[in-house]
Image: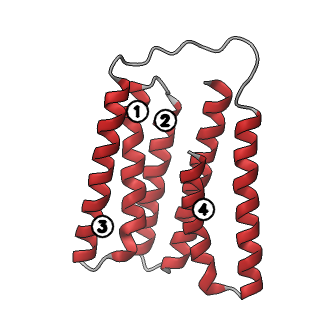
Amino acid sequence: MSVFASMWEMLGVSGLIPRVSAPAVLCTVALAAAAAVTAMTLTIRFGALPGRRPVRRVAPNSFRVFGQVNIGQSVAVVAAILILGRLDLWLYVPAAVCMIVGLHFLPLAWSFAQPQYWWTGALLMALALTASLTLAGGVDAAHVRVLLGFGAAAVLWATALHVARHG
C-alpha cells in the first residue's frame, strides 16, 4: 500500500510544480520522499508487534476474490481513461481512478476480514467525488491534483500503518 500511496503523492506533487520555483519544487520533492520513507519505516517498525494478534476469518476464496477484484479494477481504470479521453475530460482521470480504487477496497474488506478497508474505500471515494465537484466548479486542476494526490496518499499510508499494527 505504501508504494501506491507514494504514487498518489507524486500526483499531489505534480499539482505544485507549475506554481512554484525550481528550488521550491526540489524542496517539495525532497519532503515528499522523506514522508514516503518515514511512512514506510513506521509501517515496517510497528508492523510486527509482540503478543497475540486477533484471528481473522478470511473467506475461503479470498485470493480468488482478490484476483477478480484487481482484474476488474484494471479493466475499469482502462475503460475510464478511454471514455474520459474520448470525451476530452482528461482532467477527471485522476478522480475516476481514485473512485475505482476506493470501490475496489469494498469487496476486499469482506473477503480479507479487514474492516478498516471499508473506511479506506469510503475515504478514497469521498476524495474522488470532492475532486470531481471542485473541477466542475472551476477550481484549477493543479489544486485538485494536490488535494487528491496528498489526500489519497494519506489515506493509504494510514491504512497500511493500521493494518501493520492491528493485523
Mark 3: few/some/many CA within 10 Å (<14, 14-19, 20+): some
Q: Residue beneath label 4, please?
A: 9
Q: Are dots 1 and 2 in contact, CB under 8 Å?
A: yes
Reply above or below: 121 against 30: above
Instruction: Left or right? Give the position of 24 relative to 8.
Output: right
User: Which numbered tag is attached to residue 81?
Assistant: 3
Q: Amino acid at mark 2?
A: Tyr
Whole-Å distance between the Cαs marked 4 and 1? 23 Å
**Does residue 129 appear in the picture of this structure?**
yes
Instruction: Left or right? Give the position of 127 relative to 23.
Output: left
User: Which numbered tag is attached to residue 108?
Assistant: 1
Q: Position of residue 72 (x, y in %)?
A: 28, 45
Whole-Å distance between the Cαs marked 2 and 3? 25 Å
User: Which numbered tag is attached to residue 84?
Assistant: none
Q: Amino acid at mark 1?
A: Leu
Q: Amino acid at mark 4?
A: Glu
Q: Earlier in the sequence, mark 1 or mark 3?
A: 3
Say which quarter of the image contains residue 62: top left
Q: Amino acid at mark 3?
A: Ile
